[in-house]
């Protein structure tokens, strides 16, 4: 649990840099465009878009996904991390059929 707590503390202020963001955006773009070359990957991607975007999912969703990824800023990411990983961190742990326990780190 101490390692998990350390992870949450680190994610609260990850200080993502423009270089890291640009690298992630390029990786996303390559992955997205690469999936267009494989029929199975394209079917999976289309299914994912329909799950995420619902009825509005169509052939333009690839271009829209690329546009959204390019609009993300370093400030957006760091602010969202601060919001998502803010105290307290409620966790529910369970193993098999053992009763789950609520933990606060």
Image (tube, rainbow, N blue to C red):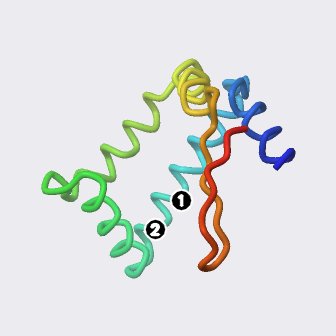
Residue placed furthest toward the right: 2
Q: Using a 10 Å C-alpha cutoff, classify the residue at mark 1 as few (fewer than 14 neighbours), some (14 to 19) or many (20 or more).
A: few
* Left or right, residue 23 beside residue 25: right
Quadrant in the picture for the C terminus = top right
User: For this rendering, which residue is in front, 103 or 38?
Assistant: 103
Q: Position of residue 40 (x, y in %)?
A: 40, 81
The crowding category of the residue bearing disc 2, from other C-alpha atoms within 10 Å (few below 14, some 14 to 19, many at least 20), is some
Is residue 28 shown above or below 88? below
Q: Which mark is residue 105?
A: none
Q: Nearer the viewer, residue 75 or 30?
A: 75
Number of marks in the image? 2
Residue 46 horizontal/vertical position (percent): 30, 66
Gap between marks 1 and 2 measured at Cα: 6 Å
Any mark on residue 35, and which?
2
SS under mark 1: helix
Q: Residue at x 55, y 33 (%)?
A: 84
Residue at 72 percent across and 28 percent down: it is 14
Rendered location of residue 101, percent (x, y)? 63, 57
Residues under numbered marks 1 and 2 in contact, where contact means CB atoms less than 8 Å apart:
yes
Q: Is residue 84 left or right of residue 56?
A: right
Q: Which residue is mark 1?
A: 31
Q: Nearer the viewer, residue 98 or 40?
A: 98
Q: For mark 2, give the secondary structure.
A: helix
Q: Nearer the viewer, residue 1 or 20?
A: 1
């Amino acid at each position: 649990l101490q390692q998990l707590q350390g992870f949450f503390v680190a994610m609260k202020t990850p200080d993502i840099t423009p270089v890291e963001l640009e690298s992630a955006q390029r990786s996303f773009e390559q992955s997205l465009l690469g999936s267009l070359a494989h029929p199975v990957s394209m079917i999976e991607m289309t299914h994912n878009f329909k799950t995420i975007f619902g009825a509005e999912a169509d052939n333009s969703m690839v271009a829209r996904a690329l546009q959204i990824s390019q609009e993300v800023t370093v400030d957006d990411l760091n602010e969202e991390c601060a919001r998502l990983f803010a105290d307290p961190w409620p966790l529910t742990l369970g193993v098999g059929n053992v009763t789950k326990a609520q933990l606060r780190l």
